[in-house]
Image (cartoon, helix red, strand yellow):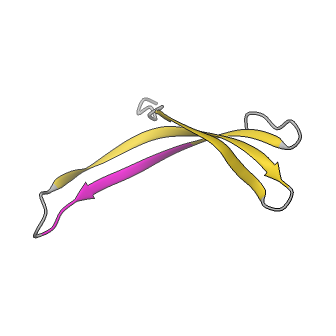
Amino acid sequence: MERYPGNEAKASVWASSAFGLTGWTVEEIPPSTSWYTATLNLRWQQRGGWQATELQMNDGPEPSTQR
């Protein structure tokens, strides 16, 4: 949660996705992953709860492999 002034909010979610494809009748696509941050602007609706008013997607950040 980045902001929460009353009946509006801004939240960011860090996530990853994985994709690959294989099969008898398709061209194989090797597995790959990507990391992204989704930022949502939300507004409270009296009869519908929280609803997204804007969605922004940005690449990364990727987790560090260093210790």
Query: Is-magenta flag for residue 16?
Result: yes
The location of residue 17, given as percent across then percent down, is 41, 50
- Helix, strand or loop for the magenta stretch, by majority: strand
The location of residue 39, given as percent across then percent down, is 61, 38
Q: Residue at x 10, y 70 (%)?
A: 24
Label count reads 0
Residue found farthest to the bottom: 24
Magenta segment: 14-23
Viewer-closest of 65 and 42:
42
Question: Which quarter of the rendered picture does the N terminus lie within?
Answer: top right
Residue found farthest to the right: 6
The location of residue 62, given as percent across then percent down, is 44, 34
Query: Is-magenta flag for residue 44?
Result: no
On the rendered structure, is 53 left or right of 15? right
Q: Residue at x 42, y 29 (%)?
A: 66
Viewer-closest of 17 and 53:
53
On the rendered structure, is 47 left or right of 51? right
Residue 45 against residue 66 in the figure, above or below = below
The location of residue 53, given as percent across then percent down, is 68, 43
Q: Residue at x 48, y 31 (%)?
A: 61
Viewer-closest of 26 and 15:
26
Q: Residue at x 86, y 35 (%)?
A: 5
Asked where in the image residue 23 lies, by quadrant, the reply is bottom left
Asked where in the image residue 3 lies, by quadrant, the reply is top right
